[in-house]
Every structure is written in C-alpha cells, then in structure tokens.
Amino acid sequence: MLKSTIEHTKAIAPSELIITPEGAIYHLNLKPDQIAKNVIVVGDQYRVEKISSHFDKIDHKVAKREFVTHTGWYKGKHITALSTGIGCDNIDIVINELDALVNIDFETRLPKPTHTELNIIRLGTSGALQSDIPVDEFVISTYGLGFDGLAGFYDCTYEDDEQSLKESFLSQISWPSDCNPPYFVRASSMMLDKFKEGMHMGITATANGFYGPQGRSLRLGARVPDLNEQLNKFRLDHHKITNFEMETSALYALSAMLGHQAVTVCAIIANRFSKTYSEDYNVPVGKLIKIVLDRF
C-alpha cells in the first residue's frame, strides 16, 4: 500500500491548520469529540440522514457547506456518517481534516504521540464498465485507479503491485502524455475482507470530472472518446477495471499515507456498456446502507 513519511517537530502554523474560535476544524466544522473511529463517507449530503435514521442514538449533528456530519450509535457501534460532496478535491479536505481531528493536538498544534487509526468506508453510486455487472448490484473496490492527479502533490512511495498495475495500464491504454499520470492504490485488506461478501470485486477508476474525464460528450468532444472501451479491455492477471466514479483513488491514497483503513463500496446505478440505468437507485442504495451498518 502507498506510503508517506510524516515528520513534524514544530507546531503547525495557523495558516496550515485552521481551527475556529469554537475549537473546530475549519471546513468540516467538527471538534475532536464529535467523530467516531468508524466513518461512512458519502457524496450526497442528503444520504447522511438516510444512514443516521438507522442509528439507535445520535450524539452530534453538524453541517457546514456540503459537509454534513451525524455521529451516533448503531447496535453498540460508534459510527460517523459524513458527506464529502463530489470529487477528489473534497476528499483531500475531508480525509486530512478527519485525520487532524484524531491525530493532532489542537492546543499544541503537534501530532499526538499515539496514532489513532480510522476505519473509513465510502458508500457511493457508480457506473459499471463491465457488461456482466448488472445495475442495482454492488462493487467493492480492490484498487483505486486515479486520473485526478491529487496523489502527485504528496511525497509518497508506491508498492510493487501498485507500480506493476500502472506500468501495465500505460502499456495497454492510449493515455495522452499531457493528461495527469494515472496511479493505483490498494484498498485496506482488512476492510475489503469485512465488506466484500456478495459483491463484485475490481479496480475502480476515479475521474476528476463527470463528462469529458469519463468519456462523455455533450457539446464538447472528449480527448479520449473510446476511454471506456479501453478501460473495459484492461487486464493484468485477475485484475480488471469494473467501474467509474470520482472519489476512490484520493480516498485510498490519503488514507494509506495517513495510516487509516479505507475501502469503497458502490451501488451500480448505470452500466456504460449495456446502456442501462437503475429504475430507482434509492432501492439498492438503501440496501447497501443496511449492509454497511451491519458489517461494521
């Protein structure tokens, strides 16, 4: 799994770690005692309430911009449901700030001597890139394939399997040299084992947009118009690319670098090859919420 060296010997400046006068982290508007170690992240802010409606007790409800947080208890498990909004840029904010809440002392602005590990699962919706994955079924992401470029802004080292996948990808796919270089990051094996039962497994491609970056054209032509066809054919041993969304690669990269356990599970609401779309995607999303809560 991707690794990074974290070194801080001086207090983190107020310009870098922004804490409100109330003692909350800036974007999420959360205080350290308002999150659990088990975190469900969703893109849609209205999905948070669908998750917390199953809670036996809700301790905290906090909202700022697209970031809505409900923390409470489900069958004895302390769980936070948090909306990220769309895209890897928002994941950069959310994961860094979640980590700060548990691993930085807000008084001294120094990392705590003991690291706290979070279990983070992204519960999302996605489009399938393999014709044999029907809509309304679920995919769990073994790797994130990033087209977003975010990991390139961090000092990190990739493992051999992640490097091999990248080399194979570049040998099989006609990737424009002036686009962001792709990268692969492995899921947490612990989280994968906990949640994978009954789900399709495969690599999730993460785009930095919904239209051109995912091979869609409305009035603008896509740079790689056959991108989905190329992704569909990619193979390395048993690995194949199963679906397309907009957050997983950043989630996996930042979580791995910061020492957290992360995995993505998605309800498939469209299949880009069978050209099908879910009749009511709220039904599989509702089922997936219950599955994730129970397996936590």
Image (cartoon, rainbow, N blue to C red):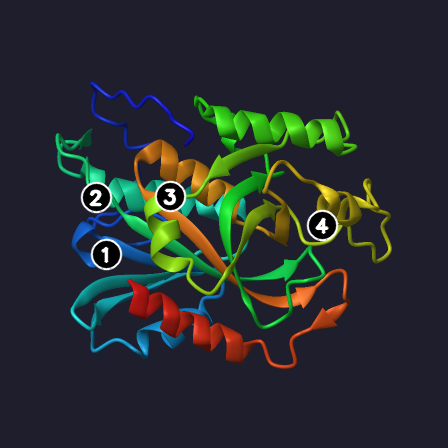
Q: Quadrant of the C terminus?
A: bottom left
Q: Earlier in the sequence, mark 4 or mark 2?
A: 2
Q: Mark 2: which secondary structure?
A: helix
Q: Which mark is residue 35?
A: 1
Q: Earlier in the sequence, mark 3 or mark 4?
A: 3
Q: CA distance from mark 1 to mark 3?
A: 21 Å
Image side of residue 17 versus residue 275, left or right: left
Q: CA distance from mark 4 to mark 2?
A: 35 Å
CB of mark 1 within 8 Å of CB of mark 3? Answer: no
Q: Which residue is mark 3?
A: 188
Q: CA distance from mark 3 to mark 2?
A: 19 Å
CB of mark 3 within 8 Å of CB of mark 4? Answer: no
Q: Earlier in the sequence, mark 4 or mark 1?
A: 1
Q: Which residue is mark 2?
A: 102
Measured as percent of width and height from the top left, residue 110 is found at 18, 29
Label 1 crowding class (10 Å Cα cut-off): few <14, some 14-19, many 20+? Answer: many
Q: Amino acid at mark 4?
A: Gln
Q: Quadrant of the N terminus?
A: top left
